[in-house]
Image (spheres, grey):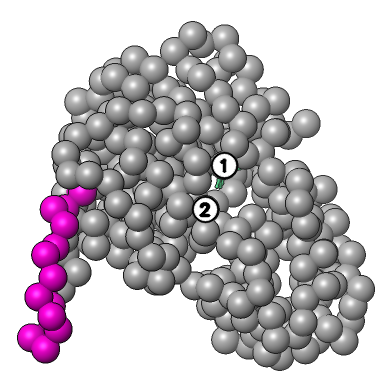
Amino acid sequence: MAAASHVPVLIDPLIAAVSPIAGTWLDGTFGAGGYARALLDAGAEHVIGIDRDPLAHEMAVWAREDPRLTLVQDTFSSLDSHGQALQGVVLDLGVSSMQLDQAERGFSFQSDGPLDMRMSQEGPTAADILNGATEEMLADILYHYGEERASRRIARAIVAARPLKTTAELTAIVERCLPRPKPGQSHPATRSFQALRIAVNAEYGELAKGLTAAERALAPGGALAVVTFHSVEDRMVKRFMQSRSGQTGGPSRHAPVVESAPPAFEIVTKKAVGPTPEEVARNPRARSAKLRIARRTDAPAAAIDPASIAMPIVKGLNS
Ligand SMILES: C[S@@+](CC[C@H](N)C(=O)[O-])C[C@H]1O[C@@H](n2cnc3c(N)ncnc32)[C@H](O)[C@@H]1O
């Protein structure tokens, strides 16, 4: 089993921005428990830790022994069924270092393994999608979920090479479709692996549902803090916080006047908070991290249309 080697990202600015901390908090992406532990150390009386990955639970030995922690194996889209009247909800999106480091999980193009990529270790794998989807759907996944501009070329090459079994096979296909990276540029397979992982785990649907679940679960004054790692998910969090705090731009003067609902959040971080150069030097994974925080008001919770927060949708794929 891999060692618990995940270094928490942006944890100091997060704790500083939401302090003073008290009452019950929910950590929807428990991972190695770095956020949960920091919340307890900073004054939380109880933390509910959710992770969909059975590995995170197997490794959470210290957490099982701490009576202030309740661990739940589930997705954070239904976090409101595990806690109510919360003082805070934290989400640290994406994969953990433990998941990336285990070649057999298939998350990384840096080591060869089966094309799996399932955080929950159940449901269709990356291989199922790569070998079963139409060329058009594959191109849409790469383009909309990974912002890969060579999506059509890569999708055509994948279909020509099917069936694919290993991460090394996928990496080699992407490398053949794209120019060699210049010094300082990321590996050409980065965006394709990200896109597939997002598709396998329905990550954008999870995020849209998780944000609205947090709105239902937070007490008035409670904090919602979200750390993202790429522009699509950061845009979704930003749009959600803007729209639910009433900052959606002025209505058109031609539009009919509609009574607007009272804002459910107040934005705390006017601009996203990024890592300091020292944090990036210590932990390169923090390079693209962005933290956004909003505080719940006492207005009633409401549903949102995922399109209104710029959630990319791929036709025919479960999200
Ligand atoms: C970046 S890591 C979190 C690390 C954690 N903050 C720490 O300090 O150790 C993300 C974790 O969230 C989990 N995860 C991602 N999406 C999830 C979802 N929709 N529901 C529940 N867990 C999820 C992953 O399995 C992974 O363990």
Locate residue 241, reporting x and y percent.
26, 56
Label 1 element class = loop
Number of other residues with Cα within 10 Å of mark 1, as a class: few under 14, some 14 to 19, many 20 or more: some
Q: Which residue is mark 1?
A: 75
Dot 2 amino acid type: Glu
Closest to the observer, 101 or 227: 227
> Circles 2 and 1: CB distance less than 8 Å?
yes
Q: Is mark 2 within 8 Å of ligand 1?
A: yes
Displayed-image quarter of ligand 1: top right
Q: Quadrant of residue 156?
A: bottom right
208 and 66: which is toward the camera: 208
User: What secondary structure is marked by label 2?
Assistant: helix
Q: In this picture, which residue range is highlighted in magenta?
A: 250-265
> What residue did someone put label 2 on?
206
**What secondary structure is the magenta-colored segment mainly?**
loop
- Above or below 139: residue 1: above
